[in-house]
């Protein structure tokens, strides 16, 4: 009987703490996903046997994999782990091995797969590795992140260039692929090859092994995602997954994918030189906009065309409007009322990149989307 008062006090203490937590806005841990599908691709060529910073490159690659596998947040990602230039029978120069098939991410499955990774006596081609990614990820949708672990060395024996392989990758998937790479060793040629893959993908980055190990937490946050626990109020009026108190873009349309600020991450459609033809690789961007428009019948948008700085401004003004009108025509032809879309041409007056370089001009030849109410 003497223990009863203590039990009662503990019971009321728990009740009080629960009430205080509720009034102070405690919330459960929240996942912020940076991708829907990912592939970790390991170069298993003979050059990975060579010394890296502190051990062989392949040993460093496996140690890096073990570290990031501890940090990847558990989520409903689809993930795969594969090595390229793996051929147990050595019947061909090139080959690959899937250690974890493309399925819901499992830390345990990846831990087992990582231990099977090994370097072979085969030669290496980064373009072939990217072709392997195309096979594994074929038909995948959403945000697709590919993490390549390689020294970047290339024998030039493969029949395809890195640029061609990345282009084929974009055609093989239905989502938006980004390439991240960790370079083992310090080959300038290897760095150039990996940088080229990221450049042609249009998003991602290259880090050295030492940089990647030092920044592994931030790299995992950028490539895979992260969890947050907050004491701030969890009311989310527009239902975009970002609490009202930190939502920089309230009233986000239903179904729109947002960034950490709660703003719709609307992609852009880019065009060829002096052209308003929509390239096939930008259809997924239009399909995402189309889906949001159909889910929000009251929503209206502006479709804003732009050009690079080549040519006279009168021509650029007309060309930018033609680009916007072509995108509007595509949306209208897929079931959206045309009176919900305003097409506007800005010519070359609003660049987002340096017009003095071919790369900058390519970025400026674009159509953007803007919500209007």
Image (tube, rainbow, N blue to C red):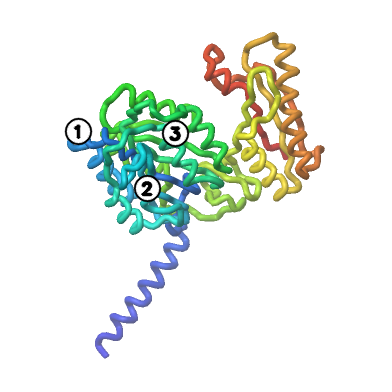
Residue 318 drawn at (x, y percent): 75, 18
Vertical position of residue 131 compared to residue 73: above or below: above
Q: Which residue is mark 1?
A: 51
In terms of depth relative to the viewer, which is nearer, 97 or 313? 97
Snapshot quadrant of residue 43:
top left
Q: Residues within 10 Å of mark 3 (few under 14, many from 20)?
A: some
Snapshot quadrant of residue 146:
top left
Question: Label 1 to label 2, Cα distance in Å?
Answer: 23 Å
Question: Label 3 to label 1, Cα distance in Å?
Answer: 26 Å
Vertical position of residue 168 compared to residue 360: above or below: below
Looking at the rendered structure, the secondary structure element under dot 2 is: strand
- What residue occupies the far top of the structure in this picture? 312
In terms of depth relative to the viewer, which is nearer, 86 or 197? 86
Q: Give the foreground label among 1 and 2.
A: 2
Q: Residues within 10 Å of mark 1 (few under 14, many from 20)?
A: some
Sequence-first disc among 3 and 1: 1
Q: Give the foreground label among 3 and 1.
A: 1
Snapshot quadrant of residue 335:
top right
- What residue occupies the far front of the structure in this picture? 91
Residue 177 can be seen, yes or no: yes
Sequence-first disc among 1 and 2: 1
Quarter of the figure with the C terminus: top right
Q: Give the foreground label among 2 and 3.
A: 2
Numbered tag placed on residue 97 in the rendering: 2
Q: Which residue is mark 3?
A: 204
Q: Residues within 10 Å of mark 2 (few under 14, many from 20)?
A: many
Q: Are marks 3 and 1 in contact (CB under 8 Å)?
A: no
Quarter of the figure with the N terminus: bottom left
């Amino acid at each position: 009987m003497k223990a009863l008062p203590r039990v009662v006090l503990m019971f009321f203490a728990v009740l009080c703490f629960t009430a205080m937590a509720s009034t102070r806005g405690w919330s459960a841990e929240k996942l912020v996903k940076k991708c829907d599908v990912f592939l970790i691709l390991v170069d298993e060529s003979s050059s990975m046997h060579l010394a890296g910073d502190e051990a062989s490159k392949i040993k460093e690659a496996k140690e890096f994999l073990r570290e990031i596998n501890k940090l990847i947040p558990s989520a409903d990602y689809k993930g795969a782990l594969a090595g390229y230039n793996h051929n147990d029978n050595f019947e061909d120069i090139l080959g690959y091995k899937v250690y974890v098939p493309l399925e819901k991410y499992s830390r345990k499955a990846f831990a087992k797969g990582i231990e099977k990774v090994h370097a072979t006596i085969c030669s290496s081609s980064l373009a072939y590795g990217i072709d392997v990614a195309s096979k594994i990820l074929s038909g995948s949708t959403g945000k697709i992140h590919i993490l390549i672990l390689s020294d970047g060395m290339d024998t030039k024996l493969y029949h395809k260039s890195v640029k061609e392989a990345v282009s084929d990758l974009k055609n093989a998937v239905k989502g938006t692929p980004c390439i991240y790479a960790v370079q083992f060793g310090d080959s300038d040629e290897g760095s150039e090859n990996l940088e080229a893959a990221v450049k042609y993908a249009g998003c991602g980055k290259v880090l050295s092994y030492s940089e990647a190990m030092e920044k592994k937490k931030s790299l995992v946050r950028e490539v895979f995602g992260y969890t947050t626990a907050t004491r701030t109020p969890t009311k989310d009026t527009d239902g975009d997954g970002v609490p009202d108190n930190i939502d920089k873009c309230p009233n986000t349309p239903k179904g729109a994918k947002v960034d950490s600020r709660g703003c719709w991450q609307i992609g852009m459609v880019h065009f060829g030189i002096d052209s308003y033809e929509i390239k096939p690789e930008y259809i997924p961007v239009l399909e995402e906009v189309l889906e949001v428009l159909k889910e929000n019948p009251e929503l209206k948008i502006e479709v804003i065309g732009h050009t690079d700085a080549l040519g006279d401004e009168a021509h650029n003004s007309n060309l930018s409007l033609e680009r916007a009108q072509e995108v509007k025509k595509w949306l209208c032809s897929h079931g959206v009322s045309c009176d919900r879309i305003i097409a506007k041409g800005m010519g070359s007056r609003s660049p987002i990149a340096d017009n003095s370089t071919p790369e900058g001009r390519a970025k400026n030849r674009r159509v953007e989307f803007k919500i209007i109410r």
